[in-house]
Amino acid sequence: RMRSLPPLPDGLHAVRGAATDSAVFVAGMAADGARFLRLVDDAKSPHWETLPAWPGGAAPSTLAARGSVVVLTTGDAVLRWSTAQAAWSRGAAMPGRLLADTAIPLGQANALYPLRSPDGGARIYSYQTITDAWTPLATLPSDTGTNAVFGPWKNGWLALHPDGAGGWTADAGEIQAGRYLLKPFDWIVVVTYLAAMVGIGYYFYRRDRRNASTSTFFSGGRSIPFWAAGISLYAANTSSISFIAIPAKAFESN
């Protein structure tokens, strides 16, 4: 469903935009300098909020938003706006020269950039907004130039190249997650573990089925020491979220 948004507060050129599920950001140049705007999508009166401009104030080449980080590039400089800290910081230098003013959002915390690397090759690089790291992903055709047009395609990118005869040729790439299948030894461990659990359960069932009551089953005969019960409760509430997700969120948002 289409709906009108409020006009930008200034006439801008060299405009770049980016969006997340909950926000829209615009960077551009006004007559008196750089502007960085965020759309406040209030149901009653949506409006543009002016945020602090990026350091240096040079014209933006790309803008991408992933998670709580907005990434703006000017030349080979990378500038990061943290929505959690409401401040700009300088990111890791771009490992090449942009082939197109394009940043393709990918996943929860990545953006793809077509770059001409120092060795002269054309490659797609991924920028990770949480770890501030660049990673080369794929090699582009050797004749890819700055007149190529890039855009998102499925879980990757689509590139259009002028063919010199008034037409265009296209190539595309898609990021695929690696698959790590279980090997025979893995299956042996799984089956052995399940067999051991069933065996232990059957052993205690046979041993206590005549004498044990329901209350004894649930309370362990009240013979479990407090430290063992405490460790068990703590371990049952610990998962990969505790070791991976929470530290990642803390690292991203400080």
Image: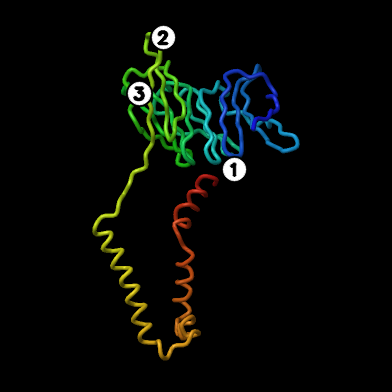
- The residue to which callout 2 is attached is 166
Q: Which mark is residue 84?
A: 1
Q: Quadrant of the N terminus?
A: top right
Q: Is residue 40 left or right of residue 201?
A: right
Relative image position of residue 140 (x, y in whole percent): 34, 25
Query: Image point 49% across, 30% down: which residue?
Result: 78
Which numbered disc, 3 or 2, marks the residue closer to the eye?
2
Of the numbered discs 2 and 1, the one sitting upstream in the chain is 1
Q: Is residue 160 above or below residue 109?
A: above
Q: Is residue 191 left or right of residue 86?
A: left
Relative image position of residue 177 (x, y in whole percent): 37, 42
The alpha-carbon separation of the residues under discs 3 and 2 comes to 23 Å
Query: Image point 36% across, 27% down: which residue?
Result: 123
- Pointers 3 and 2 in contact (CB under 8 A)? no
Tell me the kind of residue under disc 3: Ala
Q: Crowding near pointer 1: few (<14 within 10 Å), some, many (20+)?
A: few
Q: Is residue 106 left or right of residue 198?
A: right
Of the numbered discs 3 and 2, the one sitting upstream in the chain is 3
The alpha-carbon separation of the residues under discs 2 and 1 comes to 47 Å
Query: Image point 56% across, 24% down: which residue?
Result: 16
Q: Crowding near pointer 3: few (<14 within 10 Å), some, many (20+)?
A: many
Q: Secondary structure at mark 3?
A: strand
Q: Residue 11 or 181: which is nearer the viewer?
A: 181
Q: Which mark is residue 122?
A: 3
